[in-house]
Image: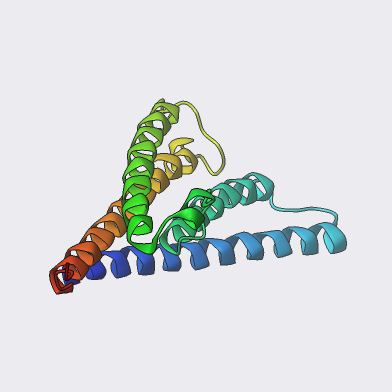
Amino acid sequence: MKVFKVIDDALTKLVDIALVGLFGVMMSLAVIQVFLRYFFNSGVLWGDIAARSLVIWVGFLGAVLATRQSKHFHIDVLTRFLKPRHQVWFQICSDLFASVICFFLGQAGLTFLELETGNKIFLNLPAIVVEVIIPISFYLMMVQFILRTVANVGEVALSSSTEEPEAR
């Protein structure tokens, strides 16, 4: 179980660093654009496109972190009526289902990647630079759901091995 915790922590740290860096660049670019437009009646030619592209990256990386912290969108009406022992099993099933959905969304995201060299966005960068975050983020969310499933299965295994048989 320690191995999964190390993997989870490493992925989270990597996403955190990327998110903070990209958010800083996005905000700096926006401030520079406002400053140049207000004082000099000009701006960075590619600044708006770059800022929009960074919003996409920040949004998807934020979704990965939300998944990691269980702050993603989920419906928990049914779990309120289940016993705690059954809640864990329901969580295991829903996490497995979510990981399968994220896998297929990642596969669908791969179809959006434009591999043509002629399609450029800004600074002569190919469009794939912006679009690659879609499948990457869904695959990272899939990994988060799988890691949570493994942790819950481990929790169930530990709790069942420590329980004493009920007296009849």
Which sits in the foreground, 12 or 150? Answer: 150
Q: Position of residue 71 (x, y in %)?
A: 51, 60
Residue 41 in view here: yes
Q: Residue at x 24, y 66 (%)?
A: 155
Q: Position of residue 16 (x, y in %)?
A: 44, 67
Which sits in the foreground, 106 or 26? Answer: 106
Q: Position of residue 78 (x, y in %)?
A: 49, 49
For residue 164, side relative to residue 139 (left or right): left
Q: Position of residue 122 (x, y in %)?
A: 57, 41
Q: In the image as oriented, which residue stretches furthest toward the front? A: 168
What quarter of the picture does the C terminus occupy? bottom left
Q: Is residue 118 above or below residue 85?
A: above
For residue 49, side relative to residue 15 (left or right): right
What quarter of the picture does the N terminus occupy? bottom left
Image quadrant assignment for residue 14: bottom left
Q: Is residue 69 above or below residue 97?
A: below
Residue 139 in view here: no
Q: Residue at x 46, y 26 (%)?
A: 118
Which sits in the foreground, 80 or 95? Answer: 80
Q: Is residue 163 above or below residue 96?
A: below
Q: Residue at x 60, y 51 (%)?
A: 55
Q: Residue at x 61, y 59 (%)?
A: 26
Image quadrant assignment for residue 11: bottom left
Q: Is residue 94 above or below residue 38?
A: above
Count of marks, rendered view: 0
